[in-house]
Image: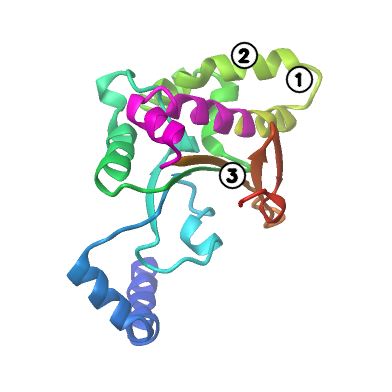
């Protein structure tokens, strides 16, 4: 139970320190509700916390997390629509202005995709989920067949961000808002080992500090 005790102690520090410093903000959020400008679609990976990485305050990000930060197409199987439901809520109800697909290096979900089926591990949910991006995997294997497995995974991590951005545009109400200028979509990639955060621009991933944001 030492692990749980550590969480309780962490909460107590939060209550005494962070909450006290931001008490007015929490009361305002409680009274007025949330109105984030950003939807962040991130991975479940415990090493990647978008709010922490981008140093944001409570209420600034609406975050949905899934294995490998994947966005299915709008007409995907009804059993896979938890992510799509969150996207719909953020865009239609919260009226966010930006959607960020937030990928990262050393992604276990992408590794599972690149490895293929895991019959001996009995992954009833993981394999069907990542296999939605099987075509991305096949393209990576074709274009980078001579690269190492780890390098192929790295290419696939970024390619899946791009594929998810394309899938976002299969939602008619997202496409409409993007075309009208009311919504913008972004692909970002966090390197765990270096701390670098890259953004997709003109087909390349470059440091976010160099993105044209005006």
- Find residue 5 and report its horizontal and vertical position in percent: 34, 73
Q: Secondary structure at mark 3?
A: strand
* Relative depth, front residue between 50 and 90: 90
Instruction: Residue at 26% x, 24% y: name it.
Output: 79
Placement of 37 over or under 166, stated as above or below = below
Placement of 212 over or under 195, stated as above or below = above
Q: Is residue 143 left or right of residue 180?
A: right
Residue highlighted by disc 2? 138
Please name the predominant secondary structure of the magenta segment in the image: helix
Placement of 22 over or under 76, stated as above or below = below
In front: label 3 or label 1 = 3
- Find residue 153 and report its horizontal and vertical position in percent: 66, 30
Question: Do tag 2 and tag 1 residues touch (Cβ < 8 Å)?
Answer: no
Q: Secondary structure at mark 2?
A: helix
Q: Tell which circle, 2 or 1, labels the residue nearer the N-terminal end.
A: 2
**Magenta residues, as a range?**
158-182
Q: How many marks?
A: 3
Q: Secondary structure at mark 1?
A: loop
Instruction: Residue at 62% x, 14% y: name it.
Output: 138
Which quarter of the image is occupied by the N terminus?
A: bottom left
Q: CA distance from mark 2 to mark 1?
A: 10 Å
Q: Residues within 10 Å of mark 3 (few under 14, many from 20)?
A: many
- Find residue 41 and report its horizontal and vertical position in percent: 44, 43
Residue highlighted by disc 1? 144
User: To which quarter of the image does residue 148 belong?
Assistant: top right
Q: Is residue 118 visible?
A: no
Residue highlighted by disc 3? 188
Q: Is residue 77 left or right of residue 146?
A: left
């Amino acid at each position: 139970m030492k692990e749980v005790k550590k969480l309780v102690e962490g909460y107590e520090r939060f209550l005494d320190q962070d909450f006290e410093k931001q008490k007015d903000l929490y009361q305002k959020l409680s009274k007025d509700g949330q109105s984030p400008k950003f939807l962040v679609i991130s991975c479940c990976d415990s090493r990647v916390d978008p709010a922490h990485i981008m140093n944001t305050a409570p209420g600034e990000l609406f975050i949905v997390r899934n294995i490998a930060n994947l966005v299915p197409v709008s007409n995907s199987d009804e059993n896979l629509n938890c992510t799509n439901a969150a996207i719909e809520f953020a865009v239609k109800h919260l009226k966010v202005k930006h959607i960020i697909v937030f990928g990262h290096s050393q992604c276990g979900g992408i590794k599972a995709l690149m490895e293929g089926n895991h019959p001996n591990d009995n992954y009833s949910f993981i394999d069907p989920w990542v296999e939605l991006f099987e075509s991305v995997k096949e393209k990576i294997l074709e274009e980078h067949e001579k690269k190492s497995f780890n390098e192929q995974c790295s290419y696939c991590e970024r390619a899946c961000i791009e594929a998810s951005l394309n899938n976002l545009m299969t939602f008619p109400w997202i496409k409409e808002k993007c075309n009208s200028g009311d919504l913008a979509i972004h692909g970002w990639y966090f390197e765990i080992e270096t701390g670098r955060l890259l953004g997709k621009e003109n087909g390349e991933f470059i440091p976010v500090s160099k993105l044209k944001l005006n």
